[in-house]
Image (spheres, rainbow, N blue to C red):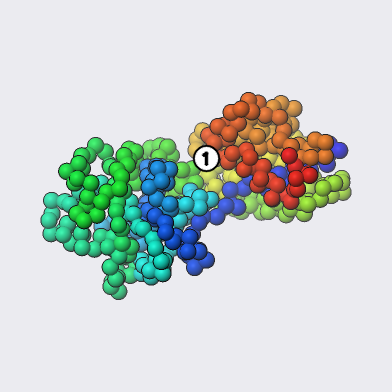
Amino acid sequence: MKKYFMCFLFVLGILSLPTHLLAIVLDENFDLSQFNGKKIGYYTGSFDPIHIGHQHVIEASLEEELVDFVLIYPAPGGDPFKNRNALSIRQKMIASIYKSNPRVVLTYWTPKELQEKFSQIKKVEIIGIIGSDVVTEKLVGTDKALSEKYQKVFMRGIPLTKKHCEDTVGALMALKANSFIVVLKGYIDLSYLRGYIYDRPILKFIQSQDRSSTKVRNLIKEKRPFEHDLEFSVQAIIKENGLYGHQSLLNIKLKQELLKMQDQDQRAREKLIGIKNLTLEDCEKVTEIDKKNGKRLKAIIKERGWPGISIVGQDGTSAMWLLVQHQDSDVEFQKNSLELLEKAVKAYESPMRNYAYLLDRVKKNQNLPQVYGTQLIQEGGKYVLYQVDDMDNLDNRRSEVGLCPIDEYKKIIKEAYQLTGEDFK
C-alpha cells in the first residue's frame, strides 16, 4: 500500500508547473462583449522592463475599483525617442506576470486593429492611466505649442492616419479616454489642475513607488543587484536572454536535457491519472524513469550545484525542481537538494514556490508536518491534506511564496486528477 501511495505523490508534481498558465490575451478569440458597460484602464508605456512600480499601479486601480479591467499596451515603437527592446520581448515579460488574472489584459493588436475592435463595443468607458511626467511635460507643459498638439490627439480616439496605424503615437491616439488616473512620480503637486486635464477629469491620483525602467536598466548595465525591482519571471527573461547588457550564461544543451527528462516524467505520470486503485505494475514505468533521472540529477548537482535561471532559464530550473521533487526513494538527496535550492532562491535564481513544494515534500517524507500545504495523502480511501504546522496561518504563508489559497488549490487538484466528492475531502 505504501508504494501505491508514493505513486500518487509522484503524480502530484504535474500540478506545480507554472508553464501551464496562460496570459489573458486580447485577440480574435477574446469575447469583447464582456467589456460592455465596463470601465477599462488603458495603460500605455514602454514597459522596458515592466517593474513592480507598474504592478502597484495596476493592482491599486483594480483594488480601489477605479476600473473593471486594465488593458496594458506596451508602446509598439516607430518613434525616435527611445531605443526599446523588441516589442515581443516586452509583451513576453508582461504575459509572464499576468498569467491568470482575468482582469488584466494584454493585446498584440496594432493601434489600428485596437481602435477598430473597440468601435464594435456598444458601451465602454476608457480611463487613461498616465504618469505625472506625461501631464507636466506633454499635456500641460511649459512648451505651449507641444501641449496644444498633444491635447488635440492624446487618447482622443481620433481616426488614425496610415502613418500611425502601427506606431507609438497611434497607440496614444487609438482609444478615447473619458478621464484619467494619474500616477504621481516622486513629490509633485498637481493641485493647480483643479482635478482636470483641460476638458477631462482626473479620477484619482496614485502615488508611485520609487521604481523606473531606466533605473533597472542602469543597475543591470552597472552590474549591480536589480532583482528586487522586478517580478521573478521578468528577472528570468532578462537573464536568459542577456538583456540590457546582462551577460547570458545560458546552457541550452543542459536546459533541453532537463526539459526532455521532465517530459518523460510527466508522460509516465499522466497515464496514471484516473486510476483509483494503483498497482505495483502501474507504477513500474514511473519508478524506472525516476531511478534513471536520479542518477543524472546527482551528476548535474555535483558538477555545477543547483542550475538556476541564469544557466537553464525558468523552465529549466523548474524542471530540475520537479524531477528532484519525485526522488522520494532518496530523501537524503532531496534534503541536500533543498539546501542548494534555498541558496538559489536567495540569489534570485529559482522561484520561492519551488522551494515551498520541495520543503513540504521533504517534511512529508520525514513524517513531519508540512509548512505550505502542498502535499496530500490517502486516508480512509480519500485524498486529504497531509498534516500542516500552524493551519490557521496557512493561507498567509502560501500567499508569501506565490501560492493560491488552500481551498482553491484543492479545487484545482480535484479537477486535474478527476477526483469526485467521494474521492477527496
Can you tell which quarter of the image residue 230 is in? top left
Can you tell which quarter of the image residue 159 is in? bottom left
On the image, the x and y values in percent for residue 13 come to 68, 44
- Which residue is drawn at the image coordinates 64% and 42% (left, top)? 409
- Which residue is drawn at the image coordinates 54% and 36% (left, top)? 399
Q: Quadrant of the C terminus?
A: top right
- Which residue is drawn at the image coordinates 85% and 46% (left, top)? 277
On the image, the x and y values in percent for residue 223 come to 38, 40
Residue 295 visible somewhere in the drawing: no
On the image, the x and y values in percent for residue 351 come to 54, 40
- Give 8 or 306, whichever is nearer the viewer: 8
- In the displayed structure, 17 sits above or below 126; it is above
Which amino acid does the dot numbered 1 rest on? Glu
- In the displayed structure, 94 sits above or below 184; it is below
> With 174 as the anchor, is 334 left or right in this view?
right
On the image, the x and y values in percent for residue 199 come to 21, 56
> With 25 as the anchor, is 264 left or right in this view?
right
> With 39 as the anchor, is 413 left or right in this view?
right
Can you tell which quarter of the image residue 74 is in? bottom left
**Which residue is label 1 attached to?**
349
- In the displayed structure, 164 sits above or below 418; it is below
